[in-house]
Structure formats: structure tokens, C-alpha cells
Amino acid sequence: MLTFGNTTMIIKRDYYLNQLIDSRHNGLIKIITGLRRSGKSYLLFKLFASYLKEQGVDDNHIIKIDLEDRRNISLRNPDALLAHIDSLLKDSNMYYILLDEVQHVSEFEDVLNSYLKIDNADIYVTGSNSRFLSSDIITEFRGRGDQIHVYPLSFAEFMSVDERHPLEAWQDYYTYGGLPHVITLETPRKKEDYLKRLYSTVYVNDIVERYNIRGETELKELVQVIASAIGSPTNPNKLANTFKSLKNVSLTNKTIDNYLGYMSDSFLIEKAIRYDIKGKKYINTLAKYYFSDVGVRNSILGFRQQEENHIMENIIYNELKVRGFQVDVGVVEHRTTDKEGKAIRKQYEVDFVANQGSQRYYIQSAFLMPTDAKERQESASLLHIADSFKKIIIVKDHIKPKRNEDGIVTIGLMDFLLKPELINW
């Protein structure tokens, strides 16, 4: 539950809750990862624990331990934690062990693996510091972990506790993002201060501490460059040249590549690799980077660089990821000849190639298409794709879905974000 003024509200996060429900008793450690303050603890201790009680599980069979709480400091010793949990397992019925901020326990991997051998113990953990935030934490359990990745609030989740019209609420969402605590803050100043403080004192510190980075200033400058160019193809070489020419700072492409990896491992940003649609292969020369939360991105730039079209693209990317898609950046090569018969090779970009199982969607983020010429421009890349997978253009305008004679579907942004079924219209 979150408190807003004198009102207490519950944000339902059914997508993640259902993943936890479906993973019960699967013999694996359920590991909840995600950007700090994205709602991992709330999901585990409030939503999942409430579900278990609704299913008739007794309170004494739900073992909840908040290891960040000073009162539980003694349980940060691995042997003390083992002994404490063991003392609570009094019968052969199933016990649900929920550990929050487990990274506070030294050798926590051994503690968790110990309970994999106990038939009536089902283990769920979260963690949020630089040690646990790393996306490679699953490898610590050598195939014995089941990751559930939590994103900040989607726009639909945001709207579930916002009574305004979606078009009115959209401005707040693309400005301040979807970190749950942000929506409880009543003024723009409070929201901005919270996001700036979170970025500078938590996210950056996590990366600096985990990787023992000495060039914190250069790291922050790189984050600013990425934030100001969301949706723009780049690579470490291009970024190194940018630093040299614009900032008069010498950062090697190797250092930049490492920093980008650290930022991705901390879930601050995500990398979308370019995919050659006709050649059916990945192209590693350039990639795009998107922020897990656009509010954090905006805070990095002091809320000055508010290009709604680029932020909209970032939000569409995040929405696709929340829905479980693997998302790449598409490239379509088209060969033709000029008036003199000379061969011309042109590359068109598809904003997103979204894959899920056997399904694929080609998606363009177009913001506005006020003229036929603009529509032809946005459709060009899609028209050069020969396969029969669905092709979609998403526009900011609140329009009724439509399909043209080429089979390309155009839908409004609000419909895309709030009506997931429309992707199959």
C-alpha cells in the first residue's frame, strides 16, 4: 500500500504477481530483480503475501524477513539466518520464505541453496544494492534460480490509481516516470527532488561501489550523453569521439563499453541491438539505449530536455518489455537503381522488432502523422519487409485504429498503452 495525502492506495501489479504465483513449488529460488525503488519489496511482502493468505496459507507458514531492518541485523549472519528460519519450520506443510534485501547477508548464495534441499520450503528473495542489482546474479545459482524482473509502473498501472483522463495524466507520466513512490508526492518540486536525489545518491553510487570506479565524473557525463540521445544509434567508438570533440575528455572506447555494461547490469538502461530483418542476423556495429524509467532519465538532464517524441519511443520500448517481448531495433536494406541504372543501396530503420514465441511485430513510433507525406515516410521501412508479420505505427494522436491497403495498422498511443489486445487488431 502507498499513502497519498490521507488516502491509502493499492497498486495492482498482476503481471508480476501472476509470475510469482505460477512459479510456486517449482524447486527453484525465485529471484526478484529490477531497478531500485521499482516496487520489488511491495510485490513480495504485500501483494504476494496477501495472495498466499487468500489461498488459506497460515501466517506462521509465511516467513517474512526484511534484512534491511535494523531490528534484524543479527540475521545478516548466514548461520544465524539459517538457524532462525529452521526454528520456524515446525511441520511438513509448505513454508513460503520471503527474504527482502538478501544481499545484506554474507554468503547468501549458500543460505538460499541450503533450502533447495528441503521439500516443504519455497524461497523468494529480492535485493537492491550494487551486489544484487547485477543481472548476472542468476548465474550464482547455476540454473537453480528463476528470475522475475520488475519494471517501474507501466502507464496502465499508473492509471489504475490516477483518476484523471489519460491524456492529462500522460504529461506527468512522461515527465516523472513510473517509480511508485513518485506518484505519492504532491508537487512537481517534490517529484523532481526525489528523482534527482535517487539518481545521484543511489543509482550512481551502486555502480561506483560495485565496480570500484574512480572516474565518477566521467561516468555521470556518459549517462548524460546517453540520456540526451535516447533512440539514437550509437556505439563506444562514436561516444569516445563525442567526448573528445565536445567535452575535451579522453575516454577510451573500452572504458565506455565497460561503463555501458555497468549501467545495463544495474538496470538503469537497456540495450536494443540492431537486427537485419532481411538477412536475419544481428548487427553489432550500432545499438540504441533506453532508460528503465523516463523520470530518472529526465532528472539526469535536469528536466530540461523534454522531447516528447523521443520519450514516447522510450516508453513504447519499456511497455513491450513489460509485456514480455524480446525487443530489437530493425534494419531493412532495399536495393534499387537510379535513373542512370546505377545500383543504390538504402537502409530503412524499424523502431522495434518485438518477438514473443512464434509471434513477431514490427512497430514504428511516429508521434505525429499530420500529412499523407509523413505517413508515407513512416511506412517506408515497413513496406520493404516481405514477411507477413503484423506491422504497426503508433501515433500520439487519440485516433481510432485503422488499417490501410498495405495492411499497416495505425493505433493511438493511449490505446496501445491501455489496451494490450489492440496489438492484434
Image (cartoon, rainbow, N blue to C red):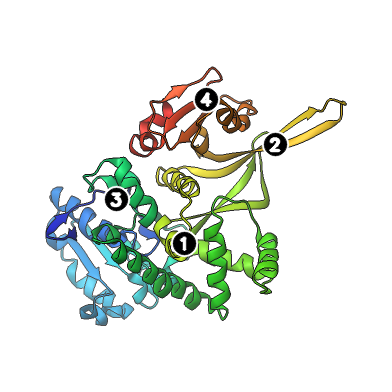
Residue 24's mark?
3
Q: How far apart are marks 2 and 4 (CA)?
A: 22 Å
Quick one: label 3 or label 1, which is nearer the N terminus? 3
Judging from the image, what secondary structure is the residue with disc 3 in?
A: loop
Quick one: label 2 or label 3, which is nearer the N terminus? 3
Residue 336 visible in the shown view: yes
Judging from the image, what secondary structure is the residue with disc 1 in?
A: loop
Q: Which amino acid does label 3 sit on?
A: Arg
Residue 221 coordinates in the image, percent (x, y): 56, 70
Of discs 2 and 1, which sits in the foreground?
1
Q: Which amino acid does label 2 sit on?
A: Gly
Residue 139 visible in the shown view: no
Q: Residue furthest front?
A: 371
Q: Which of 378 and 324 is in front in this view?
A: 378
Q: What residue type is labelled 1?
A: Leu
What residue did someone put label 4 on?
408
What residue did someone put label 2 on?
279
Q: Which of 301 and 384 is in front in this view?
A: 301
Quick one: label 4 or label 1, which is nearer the N terminus? 1
Quick one: label 2 or label 4, which is nearer the N terminus? 2
Q: Distance between the residues labelled 4 and 1?
A: 33 Å
Quick one: label 4 or label 3, which is nearer the N terminus? 3
Of discs 2 and 3, which sits in the foreground?
2
Residue 226's mark?
none
Of discs 4 and 3, which sits in the foreground?
4
What residue did someone put label 1 on?
268
Of discs 2 and 4, which sits in the foreground?
4
Number of other residues with Cα within 10 Å of mark 3, as a class: few under 14, some 14 to 19, many 20 or more: some
Q: Distance between the residues labelled 2 and 3?
A: 41 Å
